[in-house]
Amino acid sequence: GVAVPHRAAARIVRTGLYGDFDDQQTFLQACPLSFDASVFEIWAALANGARLVLLPQQRSSADAVIDTVRRYGVTTCWLTPTLFNQLVDEDRLKDSGLRQVVIGGEVVSTPHLAKAMRSTDIRFANGYGPTEAGVFTCCHIFQEADLDHAPPPVGTPLPGTRVWILDERMRPVPDGELGELYIGGPALAREYHRRPDLTERAFLPDPFGETADGRIYRSGDLARMLPGGLVQVLGRTDSQVKISGFR
């Protein structure tokens, strides 16, 4: 397990950063509690006085999600790109009543995002980040210009979070060039529980002296910095894959 501090959750539920989280919203809680996105689903609702609807079924599916959204007036939900793509392909987001959807856990498909943005009034946002960096690292409300990129950018770091794109020698690469994404800030996990070997390998001393606790996390994601300070994630340095958001 990953020991994530409470302050990591507190920073991802602030309204206005990548969505409107207030007492006028109804959130859907569909993720297993073992999945870090459930922290967003639950606490973005409860911390802002919103209504929270629990998915009745044990497993999330397109039918279960849309039926629950329509029955209980859900306005805000989090979706993996796999489920999002299915809902877009089947034109099931239209007239769903959703106002905002946060997508994360895998690479977002630009063609599916384009179709959804151009055929609905829903506001779509990205929530990118490994569990080790506090659920979300970079967030972004998607704009039309983002559709020029495949995949679309994951956004900019949340307040208090720092990112660096470095080469093999831990040197910053120029904007637009590919490197490995490193993350720092108070939301970093303390450790892999009872796995000091993994902790030492992934959480490294901060070579720039820019973090309060002197650590940065090696994400393993290949990324580049786009104009405007937007981060685009383009792959992995290893063979890790994700299926429905799970590694």
Image (cartoon, grey):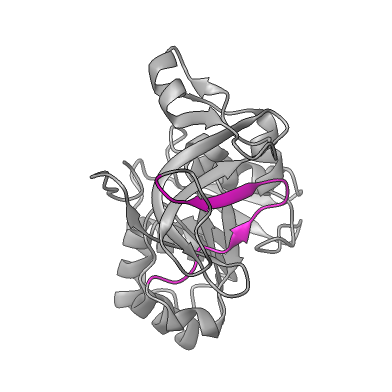
Measuring from the top left, give residue 131's x and y in whole percent. 49, 38
The quarter holding residue 152 reads bottom left
Is residue 187 placed above or below 128 in the rendered structure? Answer: above
Residue located farthest toward the bottom when viewing the structure as drawn: 118
In the displayed structure, 177 sits above or below 216; it is: below
Disc count in the image?
0
Residue 70 x, y percent position in the rendering = 49, 66
- The residue positioned 45% from the left and 47% from the top of the image is 30
Image position of 114 (left or right of 90): right
Q: Does 157 appear in magenta?
A: yes
Q: Is residue 173 above or below residue 142?
A: above
Closer-to-camera residue (112/187): 187
Residue at 45% from the left image edge and 56% from the top image edge? 104
Query: What's the magenta region?
Result: 151-168
Measured as percent of width and height from the top left, residue 63 is found at 33, 61
Q: Residue at x 59, y 54 (%)?
A: 27
The single residue placed furthest to the left in the displayed view is: 239
Quadrant containing the C terminus is: top left
The quadrant holding residue 99 is: bottom right
Residue 196 in picture, x, y percent from top left: 44, 14
Q: Is residue 75 among what the camera can see? A: no
Quadrant housing residue 213: top right
In this rendering, position of residue 189 left or right of residue 104? right
The answer to whether residue 239 of the structure is visible from this angle is yes
Q: Main secondary structure of the magenta part?
A: loop
Of 11 and 45, nearer the camera is 11
Q: Is residue 80 highlighted in magenta?
A: no
